[in-house]
Image (spheres, helix red, strand yellow):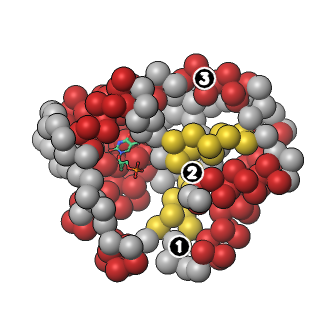
Amino acid sequence: MSKSQRLVEYLKSKGVAAELWRFPDRFTAIGRMIDSYLSGKTDADDAAVHLLFSANRWEKREAMLAALHAGQTLVVDRYAYSGAAFTAAKKVPGLDLEWCKAPDKGLPAPDAVIYLAMKPEAAALRGGYGNERYEKEEMQKEVARQFSLLADDTWHTVDAAQSIEDVEIQVRDIADSAVAACSEGPALRLLWE
Ligand code: 2DT
């Protein structure tokens, strides 16, 4: 079970209505194009791919809002922060971090971002990288650097090199605080506005 799914199960066990979401959602028409790109079956222009990832979130916006307004807590495995960090890490002229953030402006903003930090060398040692396009140590190093530029007031870094138990305790704590803060009813914020 993924860490995100484990967090959902934990929240549910505490009586919090929670759902797991994940991006990219590879099962929509746009998601299938993204999947084909990530697996290396197709090539595509970096800007166009970036906009597909963003469109893949926009096409889910209404459903996300409906779930949020129905009182669900959404645990989202990757979101616009991954979108901005991964494309900016490619260092394509013109596609700087601000350009990368722009298409996602106005999506529902997360109440807490939990960043599981692990040195790319340690990740390589632990499980190795898979075969997808971005699963290379050099790329991951630059992605980590871009993520560090995205840290905002919702951001929480958890050291993922710790034991699974310790990581989980910290993740649960952050989620508990975010859920408690939301129950006081803050208006939904929009991303990067
Ligand atoms: P996983 O399915 O293993 O998480 O890999 N990505 C993700 C982007 O480049 N842009 C995005 O907007 C998102 C959500 C990160 C998915 C890969 O796709 C990258 C890793």
**Do the CB atoms of the residues marked 3 and 1 lie less than 8 Å apart?**
no
Secondary structure under the numbered disc 2 in the rendered image: strand
Disc number for residue 159 = 1
Q: Looking at the image, tell me whether mark 2 or mark 1 is earlier in sequence order.
A: 2
**Do the CB atoms of the residues marked 3 and 2 lie less than 8 Å apart?**
no
Q: Quadrant of residue 139?
A: bottom left
Residue at 79% in and 49% down = 12
**Do the CB atoms of the residues marked 2 and 1 lie less than 8 Å apart?**
no
Q: Tell me residue 141's x, y (percent).
A: 28, 65
Residue at 51% in and 64% down = 116
Residue receiving disc 2: 113
Q: Quadrant of residue 35?
A: top left
Query: Is disc 1's CB within 8 Å of ligand 1?
Result: no
Viewer can see residue 105: no
Disc number for residue 63 = 3
Distance between the alpha carbons at the discs numbered 3 and 2: 20 Å
Query: Is disc 3's CB within 8 Å of ligand 1?
Result: no
Q: Nearer the viewer, residue 80 or 23?
A: 23
Q: Looking at the image, tell me whether mark 3 or mark 2 is earlier in sequence order.
A: 3
Q: Relative to residue 97, is residue 28 drawn left or right?
A: right
Q: Is residue 17 above or below residue 139?
A: above
Secondary structure under the numbered disc 3 in the rendered image: helix
For badge 1, the amino acid type reads Asp
Disc number for residue 128 = none
For badge 2, the amino acid type reads Val
Nearer the viewer's eye, disc 3 or disc 1?
Answer: 3
For badge 3, the amino acid type reads Ala
Q: Tell me residue 52's x, y (percent).
A: 32, 28
Nearer the viewer's eye, disc 3 or disc 2?
Answer: 3
Distance between the alpha carbons at the discs numbered 3 and 1: 32 Å
Q: Is residue 137 above or below residue 51?
A: below
